[in-house]
Image: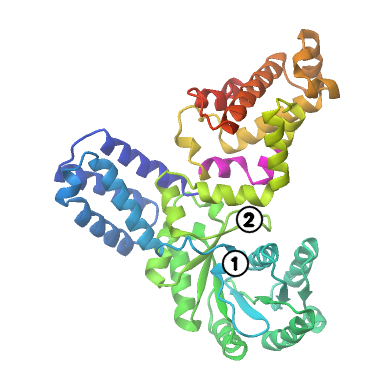
Amino acid sequence: MLEILTQKLTSVFDKLKGKGKLSEGDVDEALRQVRLALLEADVNFKVVKELLSRVRGRALAAEVLNSLTPAQQVIKIVNEELIAILGGERSHLVGASMLAPTVQPSSMVLVVGLQGSGKTTTAVKLAVQLKQEGQSPLLVAADTRRPAAIEQLKLLGEQRNIPVYFDTLAQNENKVMPVSICLRALKKAKELASSWVIVDTQGRLHIDEAMMAELAEMKSTLQPSEVLLTVDAMTGQEAVKIAQEFHSRIGLTGLILTKMDGDARGGAALSIRFITGVPIKFLGTGEKVDALEPFYPDRLASRILGMGDILSFIERAEKNISPEQAKKWEKKVRTAGFDLEDFMDQIRQVRKMGPLGQLIETLALKQVQGYPYLSGDEGEKRLKKVEAIILSMTYEERHNPTIIDGSRRRRIARGSGTAPQDVNQLLNQFYEMRKLTKSLTRGKLPKNIMNMLAGGWHQSK
């Protein structure tokens, strides 16, 4: 996510840190490089101009230039102004709190957008998040125009045990108006005691008068609590134009940027809130139905500047690792009972949290010396290799790896399709990780922590 922009901005600020005391010329040159990086990332010119104007005005203040850490002060200012451009602080909201419920028995969300923007999948993602937070959502298939849209919604809903309301006549003959479908869906929601009704509306390949008239009628009749536009983040300025058009015609309450995991530039993410005035509420970060993140301006700004996003990582971990499992691991570590079976279990739990590349980016580990080998696809392959090696061991070997001698290593290597040196590296990594986790449970941080975490796996082929 936004890799290209992050790399360029990190490079600019690294040079600034190396200068020590800063002059006005140093600040202007750094901001010139920032401007180029933002424009190359397809950020709207008005946004770039406003951002840099604010930063320059604050960065050239005497208390900044004369401070002991002027470069750090400038970076802090850039971070604060990025947050403001992205919509300001919003960290007190969590998950579905991004949505505004109504006083009615069932709050309604209209998910709108063009075909191909991820509208149907996003509707399901919203329902999944609401369900995880104790709500009872009902999905409504109101897209009668796109072939298989109803079937797609039904299938995805069934996979997550979320009820889906659809009209059989609309599915077969395409004659039922979406407003009628939604009104009947509200009655169904009352029967099911659903707290949220999420409507997958009809899309088009382009914005047209009929589409806007239809959505305007739905909004007027149904009075939804939210009208959320899904826009493809990878389209950059085109996403901003689409959002402007939808907002001017029907009035949006929020935006969902989809395909953020594939957006290496960041033009839409940094432009759309400032230009449209509509808040970004969620980011789609993958194809899976749980790949939807609440949008926090401060967290995205931190990631853009290469500082990581530890809060999002913690939230993702809490969803995938139960407190009972964490306590079990802690007890085993404290009693020296942590073995290769537990090690493999941890790897599997980490992989449930999402693609390794995303996790590394979230924690900004790409910026840490010792982690260049942990690229997304390559890191996934190596985790699979670790799992294959452990699965090739006997029960006794997994629980007591000290018995693994040369002949056992050769047998394990043959069984896992690896080399004996790969088995050696895994065992070395395991012993170092066990030392590390034991130190952490005692509140100590080893001096060689980065080497321990690296574990020699960057040498593995």
Kind of residue sitting beneath label 2:
Ala
Residue 266 visible, this angle = no
Crowding at dot 2, Cα within 10 Å, few <14 / some 14-19 / many 20+, comes out as many
Rendered location of residue 149, percent (x, y)? 72, 70
Identified at 73% across, 74% down, the residue is 138
Residue 423 vertical placement versus 169 (above, below): above
Does residue 350 show up magenta in the picture? Answer: yes
User: Does the stretch in magenta take in 227?
Assistant: no
Quadrant in which the C terminus is drawn: top right
Residue 286 at what x, y percent from top left?
62, 53
Residue under circle 1? 96
- Under mark 1, the amino acid is Ala
Please state the horizontal and vertical placement of residue 270, each as a whole percent of the image: 41, 59
Name the magenta segment's main secondary structure. helix
Of 303 and 31, the residue lying toward us: 303
Q: From what the image shows, is residue 191 above or below residue 73?
A: below
State how many labels appear: 2
SS state under label 2: loop
Magenta span of residues = 348-361
With respect to residue 341, does 148 lie above or below? below
As helix, strand or loop, the secondary structure at mark 1 comes to: helix
